Amino acid sequence: MGALARATNAQIDAVSEAFALVSWPLGRDDFKALAERLGWQLKLETSSGVQHRSGYPVNLPTVRSLVADEAIAQVVIAVSDKSDDPGALRSAAQELQSALSAHLGQSSGAQAGDPYWELANGGRIWLKTVPKKVLLVVEGQRFADVERSEERLGIDPGRMPGTDGYLD
């Protein structure tokens, strides 16, 4: 298989820049304006989230946002084609990581091989490789603070809250 289509470096830069400059908590109206500046098209809005089409050159150009207490808590952006080829996914993830590092500097850390960058505004940007695609995950300060607290306490990221079980 050939190289996977992915978001361009300019698109990655624009997303990084936009979320590095927001003030958390990010209200729905401010998020709507940010999404518009990024060229995302509104698809669906509910009480618990907002969905957009990014327009990025990938086969499923989705942006899914989670709302908590009327503010955007997390934004998940598909930044690569969907694929069954693990080598192509790895390659796309490496290219995307290079693009993020060029804009945000070296990653602040990683969990399960997925790098993240701490933002000066308290948020966090992750590059996550899931079984069939690469995602850019932006966490608002509230979600990022919870993760940082868990990391300081040594809580296993694979643990399922409220149970004695673990994720696969």
Image (cartoon, rainbow, N blue to C red):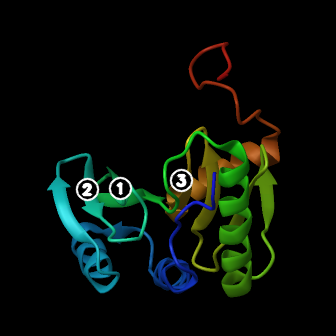
- Residue tagged by mark 3? 143
The residue closer to the viewer here, 39 or 149, is 39
The residue closer to the viewer here, 19 or 52, is 52
Q: What residue do we see at 54% from left, 45% from top? A: 83
**Disc assigned to residue 131:** none
- Residue tagged by mark 2? 50
How far across and down, in percent of the image, does residue 90 sit? 72, 53
- Residue tagged by mark 1? 65
Mark 2 and mark 1: Cα distance apart in space = 5 Å
Q: Can residue 46 be seen in this view?
A: yes
N-term-proximal mark, 3 vs 2: 2
N-term-proximal mark, 1 vs 3: 1
How far across and down, in percent of the image, does residue 69 sit? 31, 52
Mark 1 and mark 3: Cα distance apart in space = 13 Å
User: Is 24 placed left or right of 148 in the picture?
Assistant: left
Pointers 2 and 1 in contact (C-beta within 8 Å): yes
Location of residue 92 (image quadrant):
bottom right
How far across and down, in percent of the image, does residue 16 sit? 55, 79
Question: Which residue of the protein is positioned furthest toward the top in this rendering?
Answer: 164
